[in-house]
């Protein structure tokens, strides 16, 4: 089960990387698999660099939950349950909302440009979903495996960071 989850997360990373360099936004300097609750935004406390303006693309495996009727969480436990698991996997893009170090607020033209960048991030993550769906169906070990995309919300701006996250849930394994 866990190998399949890692494989599917890796496919999502591949799909994200495939969207660049043809994207209409600057290519993030960093693409990585991450662990934990959330990404680190803003200024790196060790090297002092602005991580938002460098840009980041990531994939993070979330917390699996019992789901005998994918993607609905189980509410009871019985012998030989759960019959299945659902595992969230997020794919995100972090970018600079307004370049750091500027004392003035963003102009209307800059806000419009950032809205265009945010829309481009949304479209990229939609393309990641299409790529991922094709990959799941093409590979024998995952063909027919249920998955869903629950949304692609925007987060921010916070400071000078803004991000979009595609929230996938994949069906995985069973206990017996």
Image: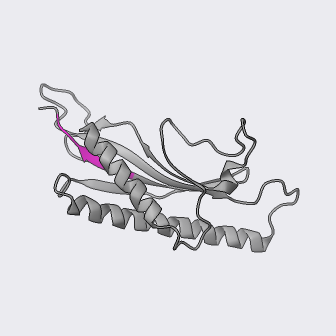
The quadrant of the rendering that contains the N terminus is top left
Check the image and report above or below for 118 versus 4. below
- Report x, y in % for residue 153: 51, 57
- Report x, y in % for residue 65: 31, 36
The structure residue drawn at horizontal position 58% and vertical position 64%, both measured from the top left corner, is 27
The structure residue drawn at horizontal position 43% and vertical position 57%, both measured from the top left corner, is 151
Which portion, as a residue range, is magenta? 168-174
Q: What secondary structure is the magenta-colored segment mainly? A: strand
Q: Is residue 172 magenta?
A: yes
59 or 22: nearer the eye? Answer: 22
The structure residue drawn at horizontal position 62% and vertical position 56%, both measured from the top left corner, is 55
118 or 71: nearer the eye? Answer: 118
Q: Is residue 92 in sight in this rendering?
A: yes
**Residue 11 in the figure: left or right of residue 46:** left
Q: Is residue 71 in sight in this rendering?
A: no
Q: Is residue 176 magenta?
A: no
Check the image and report above or below for 1 versus 104. above
């Amino acid at each position: 089960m866990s190998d399949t989850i890692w494989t599917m997360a890796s496919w999502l990373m591949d799909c994200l990387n495939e969207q660049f360099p043809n994207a209409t936004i600057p290519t993030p300097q960093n693409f990585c698999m991450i662990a934990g609750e959330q990404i680190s935004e803003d200024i790196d406390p060790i090297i002092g660099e602005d991580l938002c303006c460098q840009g980041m693309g990531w994939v993070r495996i979330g917390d699996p939950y019992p789901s005998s009727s994918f993607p609905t969480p189980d509410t009871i436990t019985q012998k030989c349950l759960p019959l299945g698991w659902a595992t969230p996997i997020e794919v995100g893009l972090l970018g600079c909302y307004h370049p750091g170090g500027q004392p003035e607020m963003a102009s209307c033209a800059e806000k419009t440009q950032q809205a265009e960048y945010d829309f481009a991030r949304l479209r990229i993550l939609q393309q990641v979903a299409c790529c991922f769906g094709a990959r799941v169906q093409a590979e024998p070990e995952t063909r027919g495996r249920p998955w869903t995309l629950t949304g692609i919300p925007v987060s921010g701006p916070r400071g000078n960071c803004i991000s979009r996250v595609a929230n996938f849930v994949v069906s995985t394994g069973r206990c017996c």
